[in-house]
Image (cartoon, rainbow, N blue to C red):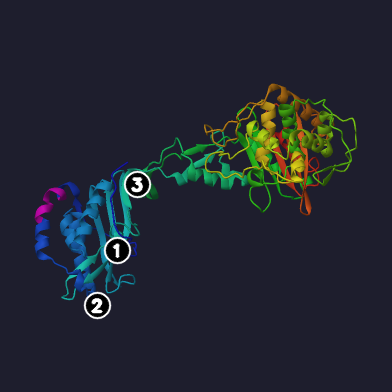
């Protein structure tokens, strides 16, 4: 990057477009002949800034002084030009920085005319002019202006500020010419195909903006021209483009086709406009393939923190297998109701009592009382109900994830110290248990992959690991039970007949409405969907998940 012109205070002059030519001079010649001119000017000029008159100089006086200032500047008699200002010690290095930052060869000023009393600088006359500068890469022209003051004894001076160099130049900003500095704000955030702009998807516009601010772009070139840079050399804005470059890109894990399907899925007509959120993952890698949502409360796919209902029975079952040694054929009687810690729990409508039910059978029909009975009996000991939390952390990676690019996600919660009725309610995804579609998609992915891979949206982003790998035994049990849910259980009305699909539905009561959940996987992806006010999981989130599994 070229050395830039360092400047001081924010400018206060308004620039007008002007035409004509004045004061052209070759910079190389000016640099060799400037010393004599500087000495002559210093001897001939003196301005006392402590005795500024409140009366502006006449138009003729202001124009004459401005012409002298511009003539010295164009000839690169920079000390002489600085002596025509009210702060020579500030003006001289700024004028030098202008020359060096732009790699200036020729400077021409045109049509120097008075614009009358300044409306910005009190007691000054405004003089406008235009600038033509031959800089690295091409010719740059722009309008500018100065404010001319006079001292009490009538001596005029250009009031120095950054606008003398370029209108509106800010504190600690510089001008540079040639290769333009990288401007992260112009980077294009794209899908994994390297070309599809994420802002074309409504659900990803805010996410793309966040990634653009926080991730480093690669590839591309910014071309050549003139730009304003800050004190660190970062691009502030481009003033002139001589040659266009290629837009830098930030590649994400998003699959453009899967994302397109997801955008359509959360708007599926059976949902009747209810807020919905869905996430799709590559269960092998943890790469986020799609994030889609509707509703007025933000991104519920990543931040819709709700009770997940019976989808939590995946983790409850895993805890029963890992911590107690039960199997899918272990008894789990399904009764119409059950009381634990003085709180009575019931099943969802349509679930029939089955006193000889096994864990696998209870999972298939989503019997709440079965999982409360086994969970409360085996996983709560002397008031300690932390076993479900421990299983979620150690095997399913529950924690504070960073998916990359500064994209915010809300952490799920399975508290280790639940009390009273919540000790039983947690096993069916109620009470103080909360989750997001992102987390539940990861739960399904962990089962299908036989191991946790933390979801990420940027390839190469750090992925937290779970303290222990899910055992092949437990993964096999869960895959078999989730397959039964899809083929003959609660998810069958939407997912029956789809090859290689495992699933778990969930229904959770919240205030005056019900939220529907469904998480599933097939041979390629793991998905989860939440529909607020969605009656049951299969009759709301089921439509979203089927759309994703069949359309992607």
For the point 31% across and 57% down, the residue is 166
308 displayed left or right of 49 = right
Q: Residues within 10 Å of mark 1 (few under 14, many from 20)?
A: many
**Residue 477 — which label?**
none
Secondary structure under the numbered disc 3 in the rendered image: loop
Where are the magenta residues, as a range? 30-36
**Residue 145 — which label?**
1
Residue farthest to the bottom, as pictured: 55
On screen, 188 above or below 77? above
Q: CA distance from mark 1 to mark 2?
A: 19 Å
For the point 24% across and 68% down, the residue is 148
Determine whether label 1 and label 2 are within 8 Å by CB: no
- Residue 28: x and y, percent? 17, 46
- Residue 145: x and y, percent? 29, 63
- For disc 3, the marked residue is 232
Q: CA distance from mark 1 to mark 3?
A: 28 Å
41 displayed left or right of 369 = left
- Residue 291: x and y, percent? 64, 41
């Amino acid at each position: 990057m070229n050395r830039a012109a360092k400047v001081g205070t924010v400018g206060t002059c308004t620039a007008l477009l002007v035409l004509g030519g004045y004061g052209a001079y070759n910079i190389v010649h000016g640099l060799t002949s400037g010393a004599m001119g500087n000495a002559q000017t210093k001897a001939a000029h003196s301005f006392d800034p402590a005795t500024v008159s409140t009366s502006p100089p006449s138009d003729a006086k202001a124009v004459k002084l401005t012409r002298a200032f511009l003539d010295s500047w164009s000839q690169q008699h920079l000390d002489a030009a600085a002596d025509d200002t009210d702060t020579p010690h500030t003006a001289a290095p700024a004028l030098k920085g202008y020359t060096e930052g732009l790699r200036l060869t020729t400077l021409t000023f045109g049509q120097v005319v008075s614009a009358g009393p300044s409306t910005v600088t009190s007691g000054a006359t405004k003089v406008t002019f235009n600038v033509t500068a031959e800089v690295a890469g091409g010719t740059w022209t722009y309008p500018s202006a100065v404010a001319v003051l006079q001292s009490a004894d009538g001596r005029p001076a250009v009031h120095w500020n950054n606008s003398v160099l370029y209108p509106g130049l800010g504190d600690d900003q510089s001008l540079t010419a040639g290769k333009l500095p990288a401007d992260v704000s112009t980077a294009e955030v794209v899908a994994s195909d390297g070309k599809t702009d994420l802002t074309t998807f409504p659900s990803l516009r805010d996410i793309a903006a966040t990634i653009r601010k926080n991730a480093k772009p690669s590839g591309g070139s910014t071309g050549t021209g003139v730009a304003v840079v800050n004190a660190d050399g970062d691009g502030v804005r481009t003033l002139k483009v001589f040659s266009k470059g290629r837009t830098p890109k930030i590649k994400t894990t998003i699959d453009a086709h899967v994302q397109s399907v997801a955008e359509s899925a959360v708007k599926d007509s059976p949902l009747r406009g209810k807020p919905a959120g869905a996430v799709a993952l590559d269960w092998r890698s943890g790469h986020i393939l799609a994030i889609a949502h509707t509703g007025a409360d933000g991104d519920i796919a990543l931040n819709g923190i709700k009770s997940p209902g019976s989808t939590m029975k995946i983790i409850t079952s895993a805890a029963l297998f890992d911590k107690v040694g039960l199997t899918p054929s272990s008894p789990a009687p399904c009764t119409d109701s059950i009381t634990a810690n003085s709180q009575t729990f019931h099943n969802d409508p349509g679930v029939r009592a089955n006193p000889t039910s096994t864990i696998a059978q209870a999972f298939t029909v989503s019997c709440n009382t079965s999982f409360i009975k086994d969970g409360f009996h085996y996983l709560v000991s002397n008031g300690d109900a932390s076993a479900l939390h421990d299983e979620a952390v150690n095997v399913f990676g529950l924690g504070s994830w960073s998916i990359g690019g500064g994209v915010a996600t809300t952490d799920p919660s399975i508290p280790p110290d639940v009390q009273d009725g919540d000790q039983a309610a947690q096993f069916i995804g109620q009470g103080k248990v909360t989750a997001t579609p992102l987390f539940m998609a990861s739960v399904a992915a962990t089962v299908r992959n036989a191991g946790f891979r933390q979801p990420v949206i940027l390839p190469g982003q750090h992925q937290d690991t779970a303290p222990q790998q899910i055992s092949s035994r437990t993964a096999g049990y869960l895959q078999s039970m989730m397959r039964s849910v899809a083929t003959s259980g609660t998810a069958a009305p939407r997912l029956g007949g789809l090859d290689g699909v495992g699933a778990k539905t969930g229904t959770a009561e919240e205030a005056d409405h019900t939220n529907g959940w469904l998480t599933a996987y097939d041979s390629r992806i793991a998905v989860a969907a939440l529909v607020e006010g969605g009656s049951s999981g299969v009759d709301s989130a089921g439509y979203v998940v089927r759309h994703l599994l069949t359309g992607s």
